[in-house]
Image (cartoon, coloured by chain):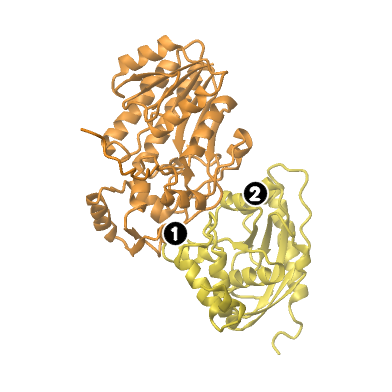
Chain colours: A orange, B yellow
Amino acid sequence: MRVLITGMGGELGTRVANLLEADESVTEILGMDLFPPRRRIVRSEFHRVEPTDRRKAVRLVRDFDPEVILHLGVFEPHSRTSPSEARRGTAASAVSVLGAAAKCPSLQAIVVRSGIEVYGRSRGAPTRPDEAVPVDPTSPFGQSLAHVEQVATEAGDVAGVPVTAVRCAPIVGPSIPSPLGRYLRLPVVAVDPLSELPFSLLHQEDACTALVAAARAGHDGPLNVVGPGAVTASQVVLMGRKVPLPVFGPGWWAASAIAELQGAPLPPHSRELLIRGCTADGSLARAVLGIEPRSTHDVVTQLYRWDSVARPEPSGQVAPR
Amino acid sequence: MSTSLLRRGVPGAQLAAHVHRRARGAFDVDEWGLDPELVSLANPVFALRWDIEVRGAEQLPAVGGAVLVFNRRFGISEPWVVARGIRQATGRFVRTVGVPDTAPIGPFVRRFGGVLDRTDEIAGLLRAGQLVGLPMSRDVRSRERVGHLEVERLEAALETGAPVVPVALVGRELGRAWTIVVGEPVPPVTDGGPLAAAELAEHTHRAAQLLLDESLPTSWWF
């Protein structure tokens, strides 16, 4: 099986590549991204491609002629790029790669990384939507993800192949660059205790497992990947032994500005999550993909524990000059 | 909080343990916002406000979802009475439909089990094996008549195959004493089709009215 991974330079992309490299049925892996891979890749081929460089992306995709496309080239605002760059990069990458893939003769399946932000949190929106609920994004990131899904569906229709939109709950973890993770790790965290609704989180490793399983399953349609349980913003802050600062209405403007000065800008979709909540019904994905994502409580615990961050003890020896 | 204080039965130790746990964020909130520990903390207040007798609780499933269709007059006490009464009788939480999606009321009521009035919301709860309390429309003029039942909401029960159980509430808005009478589940409509939900609603309405007629005291005014 020849697999094309876009967004291989991200935390998810590199880990997905590592998981696929361990699978002998995957014969070739081609990766592309704006950034180089974050870990060592063994047998994948990587190409650095600007999201707006359509010619290069189209040529690479057509020459490779993939059987499966894992489109992870989705840029979260304030994750590693600014909101405007993220929006432009996500749109350009989806159009060029998925557009080119639609004309590849060997293509069998398309898997795109999406998020439950596509359901939106407008007034009266369902609290825990399943895949049958129509998308109605209310944040720029949700709109970007909905656009990626739309492009992928069009490409799938042209190519006559199944398209799986893996709608992940907000992904956090010890090493993934996430604006929400950065914000929640601040010493003092603004919350709105009178308005907040629960949200679910997904561990980065569970997201990768789901994406790899989706590449094998060939399911046609969206799948919500959400672990069991939920938490509120105040609860997360207390679990992390941080100081919750109650903020209401326009106070969020000041809180966001101060957080940005501290290096943890809060994009609209993360603020929406903290106030209006964000969760979904993940039972279909569990049945189709055979995955069991860890609970949101566990994800929060690991977010603060930073288990996988190596802290080597100083040996006391000084290297000679 | 030291567990030895709890074991020795020191007054207030239980409450202090709850507060300590909450200060560390060590409590559960489900996806719809229910906070079971907060409900148990508020139990003494509810006990002061309502004295509830429950009859026929054995009609409710021990596990799995079910829709409890109940009458209401003014609709202020009834959702709380149903939730508290059924919880006392069965140990299960009832998610009452009809919470406004506006802060701070909405998020506050959700902590006690309230959910939005949407068919897909009810279907999601039933799939998750929850008991859903579905109020009929208000009838402020007469306590002897049950209100109308919105047909669309019962589509969730048909979609998930959950039983629909009529429940009659007898009590006064300003009084303490309330009685909850749980009826037999309404036989499921087997032929399906577009009329299925309407027929189910009709059967449920009739069953709830019968139950209320039987439950009302004959000498109500005395």
**Along the line of sight, which residue is nearer the eye, B219 or B17?**
B17
Mark 2 residue element: helix
Amino acid type of disc 1? Met
Question: Is residue A183 placed above or below B205 in the rendered structure?
Answer: above
Which quadrant is home to the C terminus of chain A?
A: top left
Residue A122: in sight, yes or no?
no
Amino acid type of disc 2? Arg
Question: Is residue B52 placed above or below A76 in the rendered structure?
Answer: below
Name the mark on residue B127.
Answer: 2
Residue A26 in percent (x, y) is at 54, 18
Mark 1 residue element: helix
Q: Residues within 10 Å of mark 2 (few under 14, many from 20)?
A: some
Is disc 1 on the same chain as disc 2?
Answer: no
Residue B130: in sight, yes or no?
yes
Residue at screen point 49% across, 38% down: A205
Which quadrant is home to the N terminus of chain A?
A: top right
How many discs mark residues in the rendered view?
A: 2
Residue B107 in percent (x, y) is at 46, 62
Residue A300 in percent (x, y) is at 46, 51
Q: Which residue is mark 1?
A: A239
Residue at screen point 64% across, 49% down: B127
In this rendering, the label closer to the viewer, 2 or 1: 1
**Along the line of sight, which residue is nearer the eye, A62 or A245?**
A245
Q: CA distance from mark 2 to mark 1?
A: 30 Å
Question: Is residue B219 placed above or below A313 in the rendered structure?
Answer: below
Chain identifier of the residue bearing label 2 in the image: B
Residue B211 in percent (x, y) is at 76, 69
Q: Where on the picture, by quarter, is residue A175? A: top left
Q: Residues within 10 Å of mark 1 (few under 14, many from 20)?
A: some
**Along the line of sight, which residue is nearer the eye, A66 or A320?**
A320
